[in-house]
Image: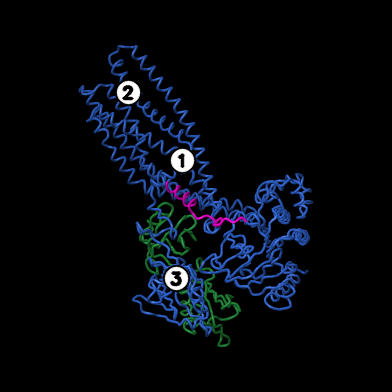
């Protein structure tokens, strides 16, 4: 049990050991249901609720409590105790933010009520940023507002490191290009003052033109080389970034995937990486190049003529001001357009994926109506954003044009009054174009930068998210097959445990049938065996070793799984069978396919084992996919085998073939099987009957039938239903 | 038992003991634990009230509870419903700021003021109709705006700029 100080509306355990309070938790709903505070205190003697001012509003002695539980509500939960009299007493309500904490509190109360030692985890999590006091998007997470941008930039910059020579070369070429861009105005000025104005020194014309041609040729060469370098850097950095993110995602815990949609995760590999490399490869050189140009031209203008420079640069603050003032609302509008695009895409993908259903129900008009709605939303958002953008752009253009007007007014007067040569004036005019052009986009750079930073943070969030624990002790163990559950508790939502203290041991080579109603915890048990999730409490051992100490990849490499809806990858049948053992010879593939009763149907395909199965195996029937997945499991040769409703979605003949294949597959392996049809588990060594997350019965099929308990009732109910279905279908 | 079989006026819903809702039908039979739940709380917020027994099985669904139940029974149900649905209904948006993929909200709701954070608005700002919005914060807590057109102009402006 951890002891830590209290924070905000969070939770704490034993803030003061002297006052005998073992658990203190502050709930975020007042008694009348408004947002407020009520405090739960648990001591050795009683459970009490304190209102504001520490006045107790509820007290129950621990000795009167039978159990404690969390009643799931909509948007939160309620802590309740069941008194020894059987009465259910609600204690207090809390939001989902505190659900995990109150789940632990319920467990703690139950432990105390049973006279057990208090063993709960009430670690205090930071919900607000210590620096700016903003709410944190994830508890104990990083505050996005206080992220050190220079640190993020440095981290992004690391991706440039392998290509540092090319990057430096690009920077150098950018610098030379900037200087070369300044040459034509200088040449033009010289030409006007020396040749055109005086109508002499024709040779100078040819020399200057030759120089200009040289500048143009060098500039063109540099631009080609820069472009090729940018393509090289962009390609490599983008690929490196995508690889890093993909690799990080692969090893994330499944809980991360439970919370996020596949599309949102995929966008981190595509969109966010694009933003980062786009800024790195194009944005940074743009910023450097134009920054240098701006500085160089300003210095040159002031060097040429201070008064004229001051006059023509006077609209610049207005241009920058407009940019700074309008970019934020403007960026929000573009963000909105992005969201509308996402909604549009989502609907388009969905309706095209489900086109068969749309056609079958003749709902083309309904879908078109939805499409039109999204399309109009997109049109409106796009029009609003573009309309605003062109207004702002127009205002900026006005001020930049004003610079030219001022130049001609003040400069014209200076030339007229011989304060300046015509060539000097021309140089200033030409440079002015180079100055104001990029200026309009400077304000956009902040937006560009912010987007890249946001993208980078989302990428780094994935990379920094705790990956699956690949075994702290990294034990490499050849599994014999004993699997032990010891008082295992687990819940996807911590306020609502699915498994509540499961204890049993599967011996090596045993086939364990997991039985129970829907929601009893069968699939969750299997998820824990595969270590897709780890127990919240209790432990699991494989061959007597805590399975968290076994190297995860090593462990999963010895577990095979056959699912109700097997997932095949787009590739050939042979490639799919080989998935778990890529080094397998073709003879081994054939043997596995034969054992899985797949060989004959594979041979009936024109391309045999080279048949492409299509996306998710869509070109094969359900039974065919299932037999390929069994062949895959046979070749993988796992020590622990999991069969999750492996025969429930096929016809009787196919099921017979699959049952035969499974019979061969389970030989000598510890097998856990879930089957909807209870009769298919007749051959299981033992059946574990689960009921509401607890083990109701364990025994062989015959024993449990004889016992006439929960399993017997399930079988009876299923037989009755089958009869009803039989009668109903005329069968 | 279905709603069409029985006149809901014959249902007597009351608390006994004080924290447990009980249903007595025709003074003939009683359900000692009753959990009222809306069948479609977002699309039909005050219609289709299902009464479930202690095992979570439907006893009856009442189409228009406010009209069909007696005043006393309806009030007892309302008390229980208020305990079950902890969703907040937003009356006005005091501020909302989008930064780095997270949006920080400060709202005034029927349960009081609340700060919360949403991420990925594409998933967590769900438009149930063109004017009915559901915001889901990073912990899964729900904040409902039944009709965005009824918000004050400032709140509407904030919402418009964020979504």
Looking at the image, which is closer to me, B42 or B106? B106
The answer as to whether the residues below labels 1 and 2 share one chain is yes
Q: Which chain is green?
A: B
Quadrant in the rendering for residue A623: bottom right
Circle 3: is it few (<14), some (14-19), or many (20+) Cα within 10 Å? many
- Tell us which disc is closer to us: 1 or 2: 1
The span picked out in magenta is A453-476
Residue at point 42%, 79% (across, down):
A48
Chain letter for mark 1: A
Residue carrying label 1:
A278
| Residue at the spot of label 2 | A186
Residue drawn 46% across the image and 76% down it: B78
Task: Please name the color used to draw chain A.
Answer: blue
Mark closer to the chain start, 1 or 3: 3
Quarter of the image where one finds residue A308? top left
Q: In the picture provided, is A585 more to the left or to the right than A67?
A: right
Position of A84 relative to B149 (above/below): below
Residue under numbered circle 3: A94
Image position, residue A592 (x, y; %): 75, 52
């Amino acid at each position: 049990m951890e002891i830590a100080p209290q924070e905000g509306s969070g939770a704490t355990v034993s803030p003061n050991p002297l006052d005998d309070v073992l658990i203190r938790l502050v709930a975020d709903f007042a008694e009348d249901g408004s947002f407020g505070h009520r405090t739960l205190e648990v001591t050795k003697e009683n459970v009490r609720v304190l209102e504001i001012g520490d006045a107790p509003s509820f007290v129950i002695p621990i000795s009167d409590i039978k159990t404690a539980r969390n009643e799931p509500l909509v948007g939160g939960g309620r802590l309740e105790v069941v008194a020894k009299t059987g009465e259910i007493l609600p204690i207090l309500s809390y939001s989902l933010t505190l659900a995990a904490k109150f789940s632990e509190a319920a467990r703690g109360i139950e432990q105390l009520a049973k006279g057990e030692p208090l063993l709960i985890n009430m670690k205090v999590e930071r919900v607000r940023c210590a620096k700016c006091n903003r709410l944190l998007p994830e508890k104990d997470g990083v505050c996005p507002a206080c992220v050190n941008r220079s640190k993020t930039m440095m981290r992004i910059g690391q991706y440039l490191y392998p290509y540092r020579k090319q990057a430096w070369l690009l920077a150098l070429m950018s610098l030379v290009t900037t200087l070369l861009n300044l040459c034509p105005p200088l040449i033009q000025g010289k030409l006007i003052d020396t040749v055109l104005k005086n109508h002499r020194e024709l040779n100078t014309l040819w020399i200057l033109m030759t120089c200009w041609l040289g500048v143009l040729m060098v500039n063109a060469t540099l631009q080609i080389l820069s472009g090729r370098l940018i393509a090289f850097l962009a390609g490599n950095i983008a690929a490196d970034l995508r690889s890093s993110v993909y690799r990080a995602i692969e090893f994330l815990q499944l809980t991360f995937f439970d919370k996020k949609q596949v599309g949102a995760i995929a966008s981190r590999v595509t969109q966010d990486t694009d933003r980062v490399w786009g800024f790195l490869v194009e944005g940074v050189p743009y910023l450097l190049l134009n920054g240098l140009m701006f500085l160089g031209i300003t210095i040159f203008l002031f060097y040429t003529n201070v008064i004229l420079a001051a006059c023509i640069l006077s609209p610049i603050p207005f241009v920058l001001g407009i940019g700074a003032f309008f970019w934020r609302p403007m960026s929000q509008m573009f963000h909105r357009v992005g969201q509308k695009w996402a909604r549009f895409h989502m609907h388009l993908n969905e309706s095209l994926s489900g086109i068969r259903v749309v056609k079958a129900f003749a709902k083309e008009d309904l879908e078109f109506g939805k499409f039109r709605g999204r399309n109009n939303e997109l049109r409106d958002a796009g029009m609003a954003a573009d309309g605003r953008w062109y207004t702002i752009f127009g205002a900026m253009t006005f001020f930049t044009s004003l610079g030219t007007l001022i130049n001609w007014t003040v400069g014209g007067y200076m030339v007229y009054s011989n304060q300046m040569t015509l060539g000097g004036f021309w140089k200033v005019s030409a440079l002015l174009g180079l100055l104001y052009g990029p200026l309009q986009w400077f304000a956009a750079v902040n937006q560009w930068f912010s987007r890249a930073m946001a993208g980078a943070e989302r990428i780094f969030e994935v990379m920094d998210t705790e990956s699956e624990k690949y075994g702290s002790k990294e034990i490499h163990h050849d599994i014999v097959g004993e699997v032990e559950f010891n008082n295992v508790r687990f819940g996807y939502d911590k306020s609502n445990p699915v498994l509540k203290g499961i204890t049993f041991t599967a011996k090596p080579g045993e086939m364990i049938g997991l039985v129970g109603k829907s929601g009893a915890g069968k699939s969750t048990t299997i998820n824990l065996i595969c270590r897709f999730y780890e127990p919240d409490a209790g432990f699991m051992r494989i061959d007597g070793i805590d399975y968290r100490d076994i190297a995860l990849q090593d462990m999963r490499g010895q577990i095979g799984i056959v699912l109700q809806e097997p997932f095949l990858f787009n590739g050939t049948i042979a490639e799919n069978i080989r998935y778990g053992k890529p080094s397998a010879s073709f003879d081994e593939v054939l043997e596995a396919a034969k054992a899985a009763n797949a060989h004959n149907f594979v041979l009936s395909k024109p391309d045999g084992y080279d048949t492409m199965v299509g996306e998710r195996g869509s070109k094969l029937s359900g039974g065919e996919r299932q037999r390929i997945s069994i062949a895959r499991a046979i070749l993988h040769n796992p020590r622990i085998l999991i069969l999750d409703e492996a025969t429930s979605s096929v016809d009787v003949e196919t099921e017979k073939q699959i049952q035969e294949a499974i019979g061969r597959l389970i030989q000598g392996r510890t097998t856990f099987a879930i089957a909807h049809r209870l009769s298919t588990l007749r051959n299981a060594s033992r059946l574990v009957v689960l009921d509401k997350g607890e083990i109701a019965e364990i025994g062989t099929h015959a024993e449990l039938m004889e016992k006439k308990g929960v399993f017997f009732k399930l079988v009876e109910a299923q037989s009755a239903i089958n009869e009803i279905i039989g009668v109903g279908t005329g069968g | 038992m279905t709603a069409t079989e029985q006149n809901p006026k014959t249902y007597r819903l009351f608390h006994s003991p004080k924290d447990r809702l009980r249903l007595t039908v025709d003074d003939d039979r009683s359900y000692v634990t009753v959990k009222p739940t809306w069948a479609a709380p977002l699309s039909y917020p005050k219609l289709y009230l299902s009464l479930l027994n202690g095992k979570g099985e439907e006893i009856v669904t009442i189409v228009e509870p406010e009209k069909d139940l007696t005043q006393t029974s309806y009030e007892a149900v309302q008390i229980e419903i208020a305990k079950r649905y902890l969703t907040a209904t937003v009356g006005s948006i005091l501020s909302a700021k989008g930064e780095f993929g997270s949006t920080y909200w400060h709202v005034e709701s029927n349960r009081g003021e609340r700060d919360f954070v949403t991420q990925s608005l594409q998933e967590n700002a769900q438009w149930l109709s063109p004017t009915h919005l559901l915001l889901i914060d990073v912990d899964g807590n729900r904040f409902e705006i039944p009709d965005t057109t009824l918000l004050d102009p400032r709140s509407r402006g904030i919402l418009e700029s964020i979504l």
